[in-house]
Image: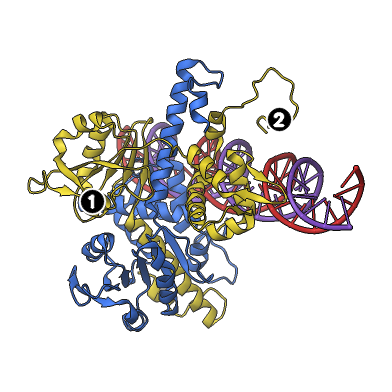
Chain colours: A yellow, B blue, C purple, D red
Amino acid sequence: MAAQRGEGETTTTPAEPADRERARAIPEAAVARLAVYLRVLSGMADQGVTAVSSEELSQAAGVNAAKLRKDLSYIGSYGTRGVGYDVEVLVSHIERILGLTRNHSVAVVGIGNLGHALANYGGFPGRGFPVTALFDVDADLIGIPVGGIPVNHIDEITAICLEREVSIGVIATPPPAAQSVCDRLVSAGVQCILNFAPVVLQVPDNVEVRKVDLAVEMQILSFHVARRADEAASVSVGNNGLGVDGMVIRP
Amino acid sequence: MAAQRGEGETTTTPAEPADRERARAIPEAAVARLAVYLRVLSGMADQGVTAVSSEELSQAAGVNAAKLRKDLSYIGSYGTRGVGYDVEVLVSHIERILGLTRNHSVAVVGIGNLGHALANYGGFPGRGFPVTALFDVDADLIGIPVGGIPVNHIDEITAICLEREVSIGVIATPPPAAQSVCDRLVSAGVQCILNFAPVVLQVPDNVEVRKVDLAVEMQILSFHVARRADEAASVSVGNNGLGVDGMVIRP
DNA sequence: CCGACTTTGTGCATGCGTTCACAAGCGGTA
DNA sequence: TACCGCTTGTGAACGCATGCACAAAGTCGG
């Protein structure tokens, strides 16, 4: 669907179909994978690899080759049939689509164990995400530099975020503080938030929140442990669905 | 579909349709949400709330009410029509399905900034996930207790994981070490891994890996920042898809 | 005891994402 | 130049997840 490229279309449409249209059409799931491809490709580039096939790249990224090609097709046709992809070219196009050509100033709120860890990454995972502000409520922390940046009091959040043009806020506070911190970030014009607090944040529609929830991750793993155990039990006993420990399972 | 409960079915099927069948049928996405519902419900229980409707619960969990009801229906029918759900009952059933009635011993590998943070959570987010072993390669760390547990050398990983029946391994090492650590965990019988290292782990089919990748999260946010910026640009100029900075976007 | 009202549980339709399979396109070779 | 083999890009089928809308089932008031 959508406009093909250079297919001899003789309408009045300009030659360049605008990346915006494309970007809007990329499935969320594909965006996440593009970031993974980017990392794998960067690693390859560092090792002097200049060309790669969809098969190789997909294996390194842990996905199916067809899926990889479809994902790449969302951002355009930059491969050469019969040959593969040029690593450099792919890297630069993915970076462009992911918006990594601009710098995204990051603020970390909550300088506890996790906040420390995040701030110390310095220049955050991958390049392009400079941490430019740290906030906490603890008076003992204010002014102390962590990862090269001094900690500010949380009350200064609005002023500083505006001044330093923070585009991404990272919440690493205890749960009770998270919503209030979030509200302040939003009122400071931050439109993207990465939330480590185990809380469901309420935000306006124009703000994007991504959640990293350790408890949820652990519980999903726990579910799989339980499922495996159940399977093992029913296999070892027979396959009628009545496990050895039927009554252990029920409360 | 599947067997209804106590509908007067007079086949030879035993009364209890076995939770195993159910567990296998729960969509992955629903499992993640069940964990969220569980947290919200626990919070409600702590505040003395005893009953809740799907509407209330769904709002607190940030999802659509129909989806919530469907999710809950995967684990059985424990609500009362015209009334809602009993908080305690729901909590205990979700805990059972997620396998939280058993204790899952956790090992953390890589006691850097992040590993420290994880170990210090002590008893990990939510109850039921006791951290029972820590590992690192750094000789300076060996023997030092973090969060109450002494750090062991990584070479002891197999022996200790077997001895302490570790069921979940958490990898918080630098990227180059991750795959090797993963292999050792697997050979120690660990079947569930939570990976914080920005690496695509290769594991056998019977091992479950979940990935928490900060770089990917940041880049997804970056993508949305860029998309918003593009939208804003094209809106402010008109709506023909040709933005003000068309040539800035292209390399 | 009955009728009105509330809320659950779920069949069905819709849409998104994944997978398949193959035509189109390109480099290499004779 | 013409052919051959390889790899991309994508139309189309499939499957899963989401959302809708309503019957079933319960409570409450009279």
Q: Which residue is mark 2?
A: A6
Horizontal relation, residue C20 to residue B3: left or right: right
Could you classify mark 2 by the number of other residues whose Cα lies within 10 Å: few (under 14), some (14-19), or many (20 or more)? few
Horizontal relation, residue A101 to residue B137: left or right: right
User: In percent of the image, x 34 and y 71: which residue is there?
Assistant: B102
Are discs 2 and 1 less than 8 Å apart at CB? no
Q: What type is the residue that disc 1 sits on?
A: Gly
User: In percent of the image, x 21 and y 73: which residue is there?
Assistant: B140
Q: Which residue is mark 1?
A: A115
Location of residue B139 with respect to C4 vertically, above or below: below
Q: The residue marked by circle 2 belongs to what chain?
A: A
Which comes before the other along the chain, label 2 or label 1? 2
Which numbered disc, 2 or 1, marks the residue closer to the eye? Answer: 2
Where residue A180 appears, as percent x and y from the top left, is 21, 38
Q: The residue marked by circle 1 belongs to what chain?
A: A
Location of residue A243 with respect to A15 vertically, above or below: below
When asked about the image quadrant of residue B213, the answer is: bottom left
